[in-house]
Image (cartoon, grey):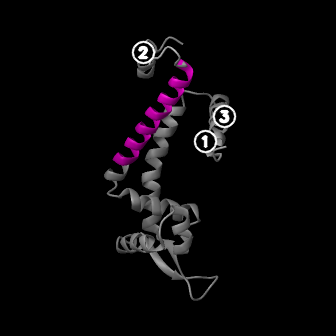
Amino acid sequence: MSDRDRTDAHVARWLPVLPELDPDVEGAVVRMLYLTRHLRAVKERVLADHDLPAHEYDTLHTLAGRGGRAAPSELADDLRMAPASVTARVDALLRRGYVRRIPSTVDRRRVDVELTDAGWAAWHAAMEVQGDEEHRLLEVLDPAERRQLADLLRRVMLVAERPDA
């Protein structure tokens, strides 16, 4: 492949300084960092365009991932937050009409949080633009290459997620 990206220039700049540098490791890590930054910037732009603060989007996303309904304690666990912080988020989303509180079907003492149609629409609109960018980036790979990339990254993540030995 003859195309060079800015990571190639980065590696070339550092090899004379650090001759022990593995250019493949450095290239892979720097590219992952650049891709992460790019996708984060896209997400920030999308959320700004949709007037949706990141913490509200994250809460809508978590609810959507639970089928649109969850107990506040479940949201707190999923978001790794204190329950009081989740209450403040839910209150803000309630004021915007994105969620409603409804009686639990499991425990009548509990109140669940449920996405409204407006909440589903806000979440989906923001997620769709992000997904379009992810597809734009990865469509340069054929399906087998995308599968291979996902498998390779899984292997790396399994090491990253393993507690230190």
Secondary structure beneath label 3: helix
Q: Residue at x 50, y 39 (%)?
A: 134
Looking at the picture, which amino acid does disc 3 mark? Arg
Give how far apart the Cα atoms at labels 2 and 1 are: 27 Å
* Viewer-nearest residue: 111 or 117: 111
Q: Mark 2 — residue?
A: 17
The C terminus, quarter of image = top right
Please, is residue 140 above or below residue 130 in the view? above
* Between discs 3 and 2, the one toward the N terminus: 2
Query: In front here: 162 or 133?
Result: 162
Residue ranking furthest to the front: 165
Residue 64 at x, y percent in the picture:
53, 62
Residue located at (43% from left, 32% from top): 34
User: In the image, what residue type sits under mark 2?
Assistant: Val
Q: For the N terminus, which image quadrant? A: top right
* Residue 125 locus on image (x, y percent): 43, 54
Magenta segment: 23-45
Mark seen at residue 147? 3
* Identity of the residue drawn at 43% across and 46% down: 129
Asked whether residue 27 is drawn in magenta, I would say: yes
Q: Residues within 10 Å of mark 1 (few under 14, many from 20)?
A: few
- Pointer 1: what residue? 160
Crowding around mark 2 (Cα neighbors within 10 Å: few <14, some 14 to 19, many 20+) is few
Tag 2, which secondary structure? loop
Can you tell which quarter of the image residue 58 is in? bottom left
**Viewer-closest of 84 and 114:** 84
Amino acid type, mark 1: Ala
Distance in Å between CA atoms under marks 3 and 2:
36 Å
